[in-house]
Amino acid sequence: MTDQEDRSGRIAARLDALTYLQERLCETFVQKLRRAEADASLDPADLDRHLQVVSKLTVKTIEEGERLEIFRNRLAGDGGGGCLDLAAARDEVCRRLAGLRAARGGGTLSDGAE
């Protein structure tokens, strides 16, 4: 397992944990809202604090999901500036080999890949 795969796995585990926490907090918040509708004695400040926690955790979950997607794309080989473009590398090698053959007199210089 590469370092990047390990890191991607750790981010995925953290995302799963954050998603679970977010779901539970949202359920708790909905329950508190329902109780607040039925019983006016609940503290509005408590509901506000709970909503802030749910909102922050939602943002964190989205950010972790984006980070995980970036790592998965890098591992898959698409996107990201640091990825190796194998087709372009192959074309460059073929172009250079053709140039060497032409310089050596063993062939002609071609524009395309061989």
Image (tube, grey):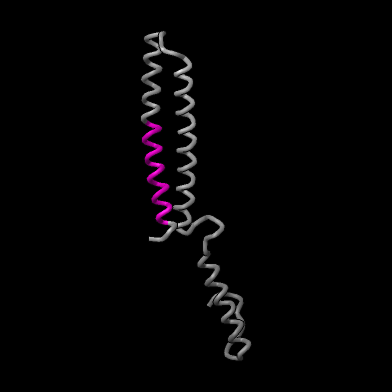
Place of residue 33 in the rendered image (x, y in percent of width and height, measured from the top left) = 40, 17
As drawn, which residue projects farthest toward the right?
103
Q: Main secondary structure of the magenta part?
A: helix
Over which residues does the magenta segment extend? 5-23
Residue 46 against residue 78 in the figure, above or below: above
Residue at x 44% of width, y 13% of height = 43
Place of residue 98 in the rendered image (x, y in percent of width and height, measured from the top left) = 58, 82
As drawn, which residue projects farthest toward the top?
40
Q: Nearer the viewer, residue 63 or 110?
A: 63
Relative side of 46 to 94, left or right: left
Place residue 25 in its image quadrant.
Answer: top left
Residue at x 60% of width, y 79% of height = 110
Residue 102 against residue 114 in the figure, above or below: below
As drawn, which residue projects farthest toward the bottom?
105
> Any magenta on residue 93?
no
Place residue 102 in its image quadrant.
Answer: bottom right
